[in-house]
Image (cartoon, rainbow, N blue to C red):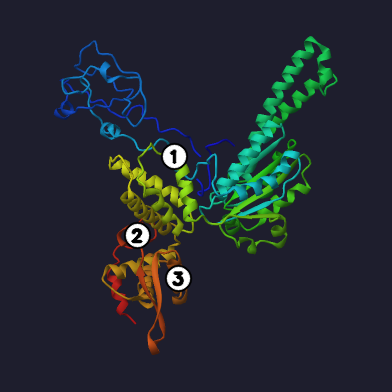
Amino acid sequence: MTEGKSDDAADGNDANGEPNRSDPAATDHRSNGSPSEDDSASDDPTLSANSPVETEGSPSGATPLTDGLDDRADGFSGGVDLDDLDLDTDGDADGASRGLFDDLLEGEPIFDNKEVLRPSYTPERLPHREEQINNMATILVSALRGETPSNILIYGKTGTGKTASAKFVSEELETTSEKYEVPCEVEYINCEVTDTQYRVLAQLANKFIEKNERYIERRLEELDDIRERAADDPGALSESAFDGVAAVEAEIGRLEDDLEEFDPVPMTGWPTDRVYRTFFEAVDYHERVVVIMLDEVDKLVEKSGDDTLYNLSRMNSELENSRVSIMGISNDLKFTDFLDPRVKSSLGEEEIVFPPYDATQLRDILDHRSDVAFKSDVLSDDVIPLCAAFAAQEHGDARRALDLLRTAGELAERDRTETVDEEHVRHAQEKIELDRVVEVVRTLPTQSKLVLYATILLEKNGVHNINTGEVFNIYKRLCQEIDADVLTQRRVTDLISELDMLGIVNAVVVSKGRYGRTKEISLSVPLDETEAVLLSDSRVGEVEDAQPFVQARFDN
């Protein structure tokens, strides 16, 4: 692993550069060759590297530009001096039109390197995670001695630095292993995406097959060199493990046969036991210590059970050449409660907990990142404290703090202001919250979406103090409309409670005296945006006209 790779939201890898904007402006070729009135009025053109100065109707001697952008274009330095351009009296390039992005490029950029504020970035230093990092290093150092490290379970809420710290330690481990020529590898799997046993094993198998192919290619180069030297000097083999050229030839043939026999695993179609056997053989092809990092491992267990963990944690007893250690990362401190006791005991040999950051720690993280992310003096004094305060309310989520700071900077850049201020942070907070709501609503099960849509229909029609009975009546009509199963009222009440826990609705239990208790429900999210997300669902969108369903609240 190298610096700049991906990371946990917590503390933050991607490439470092700004996007290549080599051709932001489109050239408008006019039949008469004269610029438009707007073009002639422009007084500060920004020309792209590929925008030709010569256009139809321009002087034949004009020379196309082939260098970079104007220095003022988004902070990129180019090889073109404005004084060298053939400008008309209004300052516009002769015959060149202004494209869609010209005006946008003229603004002075606020960011120096926006990527350091993204969750995928792994920083060189992780403030306030020294203890956890040292604990991981102490456990994994045995890999550098050729021994099997203990399995590790890492716990902590979103944005507490789990993945960032684990990747940081993994990069250090691989770097040190290369330094001392100890075969040690780390493989990362995101179990939120790769969430079945087949996919996990297939992805691991294919990664190790690729590594084995590179290993064989390097080994073949070494053997070719030995063979050539032995042909000139038979004594050259005295320092090798071969007793003759024939032995070298035999080893080359064996490796070439192995290279031909590697069979990558398709993402579907094979029996799981064949996938596991392919993975097992790929891992055990040559001597090495392997650390398999399973991020969001609780999602894998939730979706597919603990068979994958059982197989991975037990495979060392069968391996001959390599050793495997598991590092599981989870947001759920209780997910091991659902594991088989044998898996739990072998997987949780070592446990490391990442506590939430407090506001002061978040400020340190933002200060550290902002020095690299932004140009000098573009952040007002209250921006970082406010971002830290908002994120501290979200259980000390560093990812949220970094997202806030980045979004605030983007909003300021769109406003073409020279500084990021408190107002940009507050707007960023609103935008991120809306984006979160949209994502949560989009991923709800269909039944939950129908319950939420029933609530929206009531609120849209001015119904106040909405109760579960009213929601249930409209929910039933919606189910009938799209031919969906109708759940019991008790189950619908449970779904309302789940929506309440997600922060989508506010459900308060109230007493109706001798009529018992009920929940009064109100939306906690923007109505129009939430309705639009619901109607984009293929099933909920089948409801052609829901307005008459509101009358169901009067039915018994």
Give the residue drawn at x 41%, y 51%: 385
Q: Amino acid at mark 3?
A: Ser
Q: Amino acid at mark 2?
A: Thr
Q: Amino acid at mark 1?
A: Asp
Q: CA distance from mark 2 to mark 3?
A: 18 Å
Q: Position of residue 257 (x, y in %)?
A: 72, 28
**What residue did someone put label 1 on?**
371
Give the residue drawn at x 47%, y 34%: 16
Q: Position of residue 404 (x, y in %)?
A: 40, 49
**What residue did someone put label 3 on?**
497
Give the residue drawn at x 69%, y 21%: 221
Secondary element at image label 1: helix
Q: Position of residue 104 (x, y in %)?
A: 28, 35
Q: Earlier in the sequence, mark 1 or mark 3?
A: 1
Q: Quadrant of residue 114?
A: top left
In the orientation shown, which residue stands out farthest toward the left? 37
Q: Nearer the viewer, residue 394 or 379?
A: 379
